[in-house]
Image (cartoon, rainbow, N blue to C red):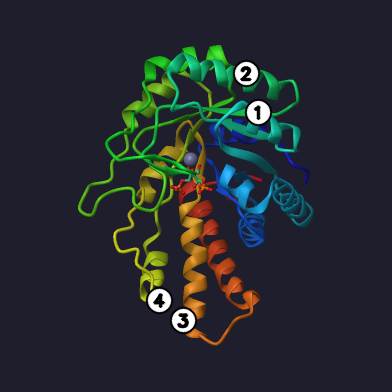
Amino acid sequence: MALVTTTEMFKKAYEGGYAVGAFNVNNMEIVQAITEAADELRSPIILQCSAGARKYAKHSYLVHLVQAAIEETNIPIALHLDHGADFEICKQCIDGGFTSVMIDGSHLPYEENIELSKRVADYAHERGCVVEGELGTLAGIEDDVVVEAGHESYTQPEQVEDFVKRTGVDSLAIAIGTSHGAFKFKPGQKPQLRFDILDEVSKRLPGFPIVLHGASSVLPNYVDIINANGGAMKDAIGIPEDMLRQAARSAVCKINIDSDLRLGLTAGIREHMFAHPDHFDPRQYLTTGRAYCKEVVAHKIKTVLGSEGKA
Ligand code: G3H
Ligand code: 13P
Ligand code: ZN
């Protein structure tokens, strides 16, 4: 199947009460894990690349890996830029084969966020690409930007109509208490999401696709495998899956997952290397890593996203 934009995916997801998983890709094994799981479960999928991924793997390798996944599978796949920080990186991705970009002006003053997001949306739309904007800031780490817990800010629902109207973005990421990385809550802290903000945003933007970043659950079984095999991720805590499922049933059409993929891959590699300290062929330990990563994606599609059979 060809590379698609998210327009049709989000329309169906909104109407069908499910969300499409947006999984971060950095190498071949991760692309294979995601797309094989999605193909077997007949789920649409978004493969997203951060600036860090483009630095690590190079734009052209990533685009060609995704192209290979399209040839190997029969599901709709969108290729998305995650957290585009400025016009230039968005332009490079729009011109370079991506079907969707995120312009993340969430750290800018409101009017500057509007100006930048509109510039990207105008450029993208003329070229058949779609755009995700963001209002509100999440805690955690994205590339080199670190937002300390307590310095995040929830999305203000009274801004969303104005923002969407003036920028022309096609979807909107909002901050309701999710955060990036594997340490989202302190031990003993009760995970909470502001569903009241999500409800208010959806009322103000009927039919409009909402995006959740920082939505890994930090799956405890993989954290346990890592810790049992020499790792030190004792206090890793994520978003409870029932909360994400509730969000996926609502206006949330895209749920971003990266940390859980990293945990799956790392758990597989650690487990393999601990059991076989003499192994040094990457194909051996990456096979286990890729299998766990694939297991993570299948679990997300079935348990959190509800996108099984929607391809
Ligand atoms: O939002 C951040 C994503 O997890 C991407 O992480 O910038 O380290 O590639 P990265
Ligand atoms: P996690 O760190 O929770 O996986 O979030 C990933 C993300 O939001 C990518 O943009
Ligand atoms: Zn994010």
Q: Estimate how packed mark 4 is, as few (under 14), some (14 to 19) or many (20 or more) residues with alpha carbons within 10 Å.
A: some
Residue 97 percent across, percent down from the top left: 75, 38
Q: Is mark 4 within 8 Å of ligand 2?
A: no
- Residue linked to disc 1: 130
- Which residue is drawn at the image coordinates 60% and 44% (left, top)? 48
Secondary structure at badge 1 equals strand
Q: Is residue 284 left or right of residue 139?
A: right
Disc nearer the start of the sequence (1/4): 1
- Residue linked to disc 3: 274
Amino acid type at circle 1 is Val
- Residue linked to disc 2: 119
Closer to the camera in the image, 188 or 7: 188
- Residue linked to disc 4: 229
Amino acid type at circle 3 is Phe
Secondary structure at badge 3 equals helix
Instruction: Please report contact status of discs 3 and 4: CB closer than 8 Å, yes or no.
Output: yes
Q: CA distance from mark 1 to mark 2?
A: 13 Å
Disc nearer the start of the sequence (1/2): 2
Q: Estimate how packed mark 1 is, as few (under 14), some (14 to 19) or many (20 or more) residues with alpha carbons within 10 Å.
A: many
Residue 49 quadrant: top right
Instruction: Please report contact status of discs 1 and 2: CB closer than 8 Å, yes or no.
Output: no
- Which residue is drawn at the image coordinates 47% and 76% (left, top)? 271
Q: CA distance from mark 1 to mark 4?
A: 42 Å
Amino acid type at circle 2 is Arg
Residue 156 percent across, percent down from the top left: 36, 21
Amino acid type at circle 4 is Asn
Q: Is mark 1 within 8 Å of ligand 2?
A: no
Secondary structure at badge 2 equals helix
